[in-house]
Image (spheres, grey):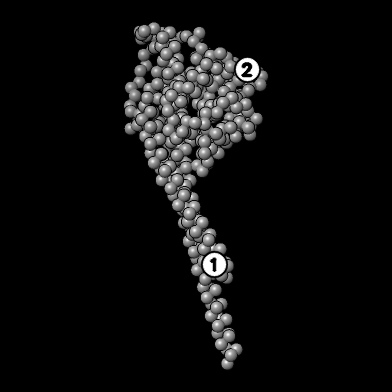
Amino acid sequence: MAVSSKAIKTRIKSVKNTKKITKAMELVSAAKMRKAVDATLQARLYATLAQQLMERLSELQEPNYPLFEQRPVKKILMILISSNRGLCGSFNGNVMKFGKRLLEDKKNLAAHRGPDGQSTPPGAGDIDVEVLGIGRKSAAFAKKNDLELIEVYDSLGDSPDIDDAIHISKNVTEKFKTGTYDKVVVLFTHFASSLTQTVKVRQLLPVAKAEVDKLLTEFPNKDHIGELAPDNRPIETYFLEPSRDAIFDIVIPRLIDVQVYQALLESAASEHSARMVAMKNASEAASEMIDALTLAFNKARQAAITQEIAEIAGGAAALE
């Protein structure tokens, strides 16, 4: 019994040390989450207004502008946003599962969404999907699904910067313009609350009104995005300065930067929230385990004391 008590005592000490680590990680993740959530909510109004501006500009009859061109989809680039580290619950697992479901129906993924929400099916032929990963865990997704991983951005840190988003969006925009890819989508985790995060897929290129409508419905809390006045006047009634070409060449790429930046912020807030909850659950589980081990230790010690008393009493009775 003495050996058993010693082993239990060692186990209790080990679990207590683990609890200290998980509690510290919980507090760190909570602090990071608050900063990430603040940045996400502050950027939502800008992102929403940028999306609306892009929607208005997409109504112009400008067939020669490449970022609006809806061509037959033969090759898709999937920007998959994951984390660099684990210990964040089902955050990465949910992204991988959602991405796998998309790959099971490539024709639906390749379809262009019209203004009325109807899908335009792609042409006949195989559809190739390649992955641009953000976070080290995205590499595992590409390898597991036999997809080509063209690049991995694994140094963005806990707080994504707008410069990172600009670099990524510029990279994919150039590839879309040159015809390397016919469609670019971004797979990210939308932050709803500290307990609720939902994986979303959004079409980044070509610019589509249906995707704008989806984004606007994701922000139900008007306190964070404000009330946006509708504008039903035709875009052709506006005078565009300095010129239409200047707007397309400068403003549209900038608006795409905003979409990528918003996806990075949403995923960062979701990751920190998932890690905070996972570490909180781990700390609570450690507390329960410590209680159970303490009870077992007390029982083992009591059993050892009872046995010693019985041996002493037995020895005294033998001497009489």
Determine the residue positioned at 49% across, 23% down: 168
Determine the residue positioned at 54% across, 63% down: 8
Q: CA distance from mark 2 to mark 1?
A: 71 Å
- Asked if 54 appears above or below 277 in the picture, the reply is above
Q: Residue furthest bottom?
A: 320
The label nearer to you, 2 versus 1, is 1
On the image, the x and y values in percent for residue 43 come to 38, 28
Say which residue label 1 marks.
5
Q: Residue 234: which quarter of the image?
A: top left
Q: Earlier in the sequence, mark 2 or mark 1?
A: 1
- Which is nearer the eye, 128 or 53? 128
- Which is nearer the eye, 251 or 133? 133
On the image, the x and y values in percent for residue 181 come to 57, 18
Q: Quadrant of the C terminus?
A: bottom right
- Asked if 239 appears above or below 113 in the picture, the reply is above
Q: How many C-alpha atoms fall within 10 Å of the one at disc 1: few (<14), some, or many (≥20)?
A: many
Instruction: For residue 129, say whether it is visible.
Output: yes
- What SS does tag 2 mark? loop
Circle 2: residue type? Gly
Circle 1: residue type? Ser
Say which residue label 2 marks.
123
On the image, the x and y values in percent for residue 111 come to 57, 21
Determine the residue positioned at 50% across, 68% down: 298
* In-image side of 298 versus 41 (left or right): right
Determine the residue positioned at 48% across, 22% down: 167
On the image, the x and y values in percent for residue 257 come to 44, 22
- What SS does tag 1 mark? helix
* In-image side of 265 versus 4 (left or right): left
